Image (cartoon, grey):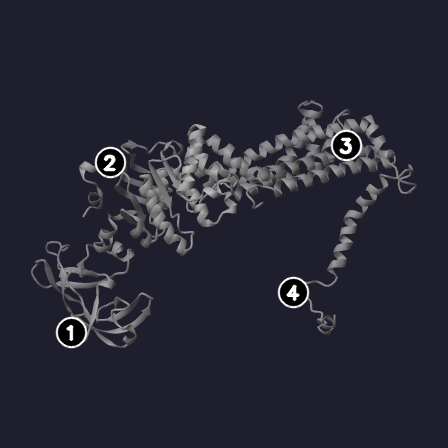
Amino acid sequence: MAAIEHSKPKKRRAFGEVPGLGALAIAFMMFLYLPILVLVVYSFNAGNIVMVWTGFSTDWYARAFANEDIRKAAINSLVVATSATAIATTCATLAALALARGGSFKGKGATVGVITLPLMVPEIVTAVAMLVFFSNIGLNFGLGNVILAHVTFCIPFAFMPIRARLDGMDTTLEQASRDLYASDWETFRLVTLPQLMPGVLAGAMLSFVISMDDFIITLMVAGAGDTTLPVYIYSMIRQGITPEINAVSSILLLFSIVLVTAYWFVTRTKPDGKNR
Amino acid sequence: MSVAQAAALPIAERARAAVELDNVEKTYGTGKSAVKALKGVSFDIADNEFFTLLGPSGCGKTTLLRALAWFESVTAGTIRLFGEDIVDVPTYKRSINTVFQHYSLFPHMSVAENVAYGLKRLKKSKSEIEATVADMLELVKMTDFAGRLPAQLSGGQQQRVALARALAPHPKVLLLDEPLSALDLKLRQSMRQELKQIQARTGITFIFVTHDQDEALSMSDRVAVMSAGYVQQVGTPNEIYEHPANRFVAGFVGDANFIDAQITSPVGDTVTCRTKGGAVLQADARNLLEGQRDVTLFLRPEKVKLAKVGAATVDGEITDIQYLGNSTMMQIDIGEAEPLVVTEPLGEVDQRLRQVGDRVGVILSPSALQILVE
């Protein structure tokens, strides 16, 4: 003990250390997550006034699950997100493959720009454009309209991680496969796709979350019976905030957390051991 | 002298040629920006031969290898594999396998799965695949690692697996693209020996690409020296080293001294010539062309012997000494354009007695002085 007292180190700031950064970071985290935490806590409130704590209860969850409209909206959301993700990820994978492996063609650079452009376009513009376009051509597939709209804005989100993964991949692996008597299809199935999988998973997860979460475009495009969860939550709020909304939002949050965690575990245990 | 003619095997042996290259050309790009990577490459590689393509980077050796594996198409010429024209046969239908420079093992497959990959694509029976994989892993001494993933292996071990994977389908020809360049020196030297043994054991024709002259000389049955898209010389390591076809080969394979001289005597087995510096030397006359007067003499550093001043062919002054462990390399100024590079093995003379500035006699024997074909 004495030795420690003797060698009381002079307080020296480590290189790159910023004074007060810790406190600032905590404040920032609270700003980000405190509202969400409050939302979750009050979803277990027994009373029906949102911000007055009267006791613990899971009543609101039971009610939310029993609510036919919420159930329907949740199923719609899942159907839309799953279909849009599947279609968008497939399109994005094919586009990325064509761009990275398909040799050079005219307008290659412009193609990448066009694929990722929807990221820059304000969502309200896309939403209005789709509404007008769909009604002009008389497209009316109900939930199909929503899925179609979601596919369009999910493609760039799915495309980016797939493209990044593909760019980092060694083309000599594909040469090695062909050298060992594999046809182009076998090479894709046995070598390219397994290598590309982390990118595809990341792209799919991103599109799923973006699709689940979308409000503006869905609001414009969805017909009366095709309400998704975010749109339904918004309509509930307009009738007054009840803890039921908290409960539904918490379920949505839990769903996202599970998804991200699952993705993290899947990529962490990638057999190539060097998880990129 | 036509390189193509010198490279062709005798008629009787032509039937046994594993690979015949006939006027192979490769041009990248078109118009003004076109780059010729291969220019009229013609030579044969015999069956069961350890054949090396040697040259500096950018000489076209890798392009030629890629053309053989069909990762690259050729612009002109024919490539025959055991008599069959394979120019238009795609990679996956050629009985040629490749060991890649950076191994290129499939990272998501185990060692055994990697080795089995080619056999599975060839639709071999399960029992045959298992037996061959076991054989191959034993051949490269990797049996204990069958279940490991490539990321769990060292570079040398990955190289062994890559070799086993390429050998497993028993190709007619195995291509090796600088497979040892990523390994450290000790491992590289032991792998040389092992590669040579594996080649002899399997009886497969090896085509080995390298820029390392030691590798080429120590392992090969024959070597093709390439530069600027041309094949400069094809021959046994001994022929290439002792009788280089031209200045490039002489300078690239081993160290060499070049001395400009003029013929002063009639031609016999040896000729007398006078150097620019005024020395009179006897040289081997075998490469002398008729009527040729200006010649370049070529001399390996280890063929020079040193003696006392006045007791040798010419005298000179030591201008630099490098200690190399088993020998000493000296630069000796003998009054020519370039100082003479001389290596003297340690042990014959106490080299600590040699000092920069010392005057020594230099013995240039007629058998060591060759006339270089330009």
Residue A268 shows up from this direction: yes
**Nearest to N terminus: mark 4 or mark 3:** 4
Which amino acid, mark 3? Leu
Q: Earlier in the sequence, mark 2 or mark 1?
A: 2
Q: Residues within 10 Å of mark 4 (few under 14, many from 20)?
A: few
Q: Identify the residue position indicated by label 3 in the image.
A: A229
Looking at the rendered structure, the kind of residue marked 1 is: Ala
Label 1 marks a residue whose chain is B
Residue of label 4: A15
B150 or B301: which is nearer to us?
Answer: B150
* Residue A69 percent location from the top left of the image: 81, 27
Q: Which chain is mark 2 on?
A: B
**Badge 4 and badge 2 in a common chain:** no
- Say what amino acid the circle numbered 2 marks: Arg
In the image, taking residue A131 as reference, residue B264 lies left or right, namely left
Q: Residue B316 is drawn in which quadrant?
A: bottom left
What secondary structure is marked by label 1? Answer: loop
Q: CA distance from mark 2 to mark 1?
A: 54 Å
What is the three-letter code of the residue carrying label 4?
Answer: Phe
2 and 1 marks on the same chain: yes
Q: Which residue is mark 1?
A: B311
Please rate how many residues cluster around mark 2, counting C-alpha atoms within 10 Å: few if below 14, some from 14 to 19, many from 20: some
Residue occupied by mark 2? B16
